[in-house]
Amino acid sequence: MVLLKEYRICMPLTVEEYRVGQLYMIARHSLEQSESGEGVEVIVNVPCEHPEHGKGQYTEKRIHLSSRLPFWIQSFLPRVFYVTEKAWNYYPYTITEYTCSFIPKFSIHIQTKFENNNGSSENCLNLTPEQLEQRTVDFVDICYDEISPRHYKEEEDLRFFQSSVTKRGPLAEGWTSTTQPIMCSYKVVQANFDVWGLQTKAEELIQRSIREILLLGHRQAFAWVDEWYNMTLADVRVFESEMHRQTNTKVTEDLPSVPTTPLTPPAPTTPTVANRSSWFPWQ
């Protein structure tokens, strides 16, 4: 059975504040986590529009990560390996897809919605009754959930951090019930790795990896609040563009030539959420 998880990640911010914070965090996080030959390469970053969700931003990225994978996955992948990320950001609603041309039966689909509450919405992404039966809800605590030692930084420890700009923090135990303002990032993640003998192991690894990334990214979004809080949307787009330039240079320095996959057209079509069979072979 394909794993269906809904992650709920609270932050001491409002949805409107996080519009800038999310863009800042993703751009800076991508640069910090990238190195020569490994990391996130931005291919496309253009406006898009949807009849229901309105104007948004479409991005397409290549995530180069061969050496970061467990050996049992590296053993059957080509030496030069990347995952393609396509994201449609109609804030406060987004769709993100991950695919790999080398593994046609691999896919991850993420729907996200941001709301001004502490994770109390039971079905904010309008899952079907069948999906609700399969769903596992996982509350991610950006302050008190254990973080990998390799990612720990004292200045990002939210048990002790206080914003000098907003005066929010430190976050005490039980903070999601007592803190204002508060918002929640609801993320429904469906992962598929339909390779005989590896499906369960791989899908569990994918979900663990996604949880770790969500924990670190949302934690950093608040830890870096003083740096982005007074930015306008235009300011953060300029910052994002510069981070993309630096990240691409960093990642592609020693990158061997890779087989190219066709790029999505400049005005990509947003996936129709109701018709998931078009990208989900199990439905």
Image (cartoon, rainbow, N blue to C red):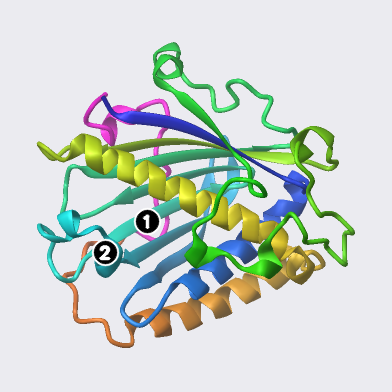
Is residue 80 placed above or below 271 in the rendered structure?
below
Measured Cα–Cα span from mark 1 to mark 2: 10 Å
In terms of secondary structure, what is the magenta stretch mainly? loop
SS type, badge 1: strand
Residue 245, x across and y down, in percent: 49, 81
Q: Is residue 266 magenta?
A: yes
Residue 110, x across and y down, in percent: 44, 40
Residue 46, x across and y down, in percent: 49, 63
Q: Are marks 1 and 2 in contact (CB under 8 Å)?
A: no
Report the residue marked by disc 1: 85
Q: Which mark, by number, is residue 82?
A: 2
Mark 1, Cα crowd under 10 Å, few <14 / some 14-19 / many 20+, is: many
Does the image show residue 269? Answer: no
Which residues lie in the magenta part?
265-283
SS type, badge 2: strand
Mark 2, Cα crowd under 10 Å, few <14 / some 14-19 / many 20+, is: many
Amino acid type of the residue that numbered disc 1 sits on in the rendered structure: Glu
Which quadrant would the C terminus be assigned to in this image?
Answer: top left
Q: Is residue 58 magenta?
A: no
Q: Which mark, by number, is residue 254?
A: none
Is residue 97 placed above or below 150 in the rendered structure?
above
Q: Residue at x 16, y 47 (%)?
A: 104
In the picture, measured across the screen, residue 111 lies left or right of residue 56, that is: left
Does the image show residue 94? Answer: yes
In the picture, measured across the screen, residue 221 lies left or right of residue 269, that is: right
Q: Residue at x 57, y 35 (%)?
A: 52
Amino acid type of the residue that numbered disc 2 sits on in the rendered structure: Tyr
Q: Residue at x 83, y 63 (%)?
A: 163
Choose top left, top right, bottom left or bottom right for residue 83: bottom left
Is residue 222 placed above or below 43 in the rendered structure?
above
Which one is in front, 252 or 38?
A: 38
